[in-house]
Image (cartoon, rainbow, N blue to C red):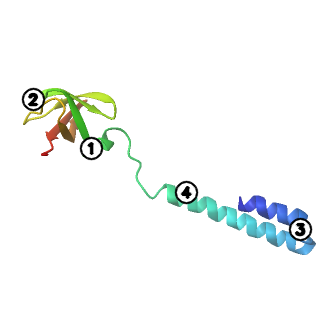
Amino acid sequence: MLLITAIVLAFFFVPAPWNAVVLAIGLVGEAGEVLFGIWYGRRRIALAGARTMVGATARVVEACCPNGRVSYKGERWIASCAEGAGVGERVRVGSLNGLTLVVERIDQ
């Protein structure tokens, strides 16, 4: 946006010797915006896949004694709960074992 503003100012409003300065300032400003955007986008590690589930809560839809099924963000997953969990209980995802979620009950 800064570059477009500089171009409009340089061609329509700023006299001849100063229009090059305005364009140079616009280019430097635009480069700064791009570099800031790259830096800001790389600040955090993108979480995707199984790593996003660890520590999240899910709802038991089929009793886990010790194996059952849980619902996490609308998806049904096979789960294993060593202490057992009944239907409707909330559980926390501790880890993944292949495609099986290892969960633990949340004390309510």
Dot 4 or dot 1, earlier in sequence = 4
Residue named by callout 4: 38
Callout 1 secondary element? loop
Rounded to the nearest angstrom, the CA distance separating label 2 from label 3 is: 75 Å
Q: Residue at x 92, y 72 (%)?
A: 15
How busy is the neighbourhood of tag 1: few (under 14 within 10 Å), some, or many (20 plus)?
A: some
Callout 3 secondary element? loop
- The picture places residue 72, in percent across and down from the top left corner, at 29, 34
| Quadrant position of residue 24 | bottom right
Dot 4 or dot 3, earlier in sequence = 3
Amino acid at dot 3: Phe
Foreground residue among 74 and 50: 74
Rounded to the nearest angstrom, the CA distance separating label 4 from label 1 is: 29 Å
Residue named by callout 3: 13
Callout 4 secondary element? helix
Amino acid at dot 4: Ile
Residue named by callout 2: 66
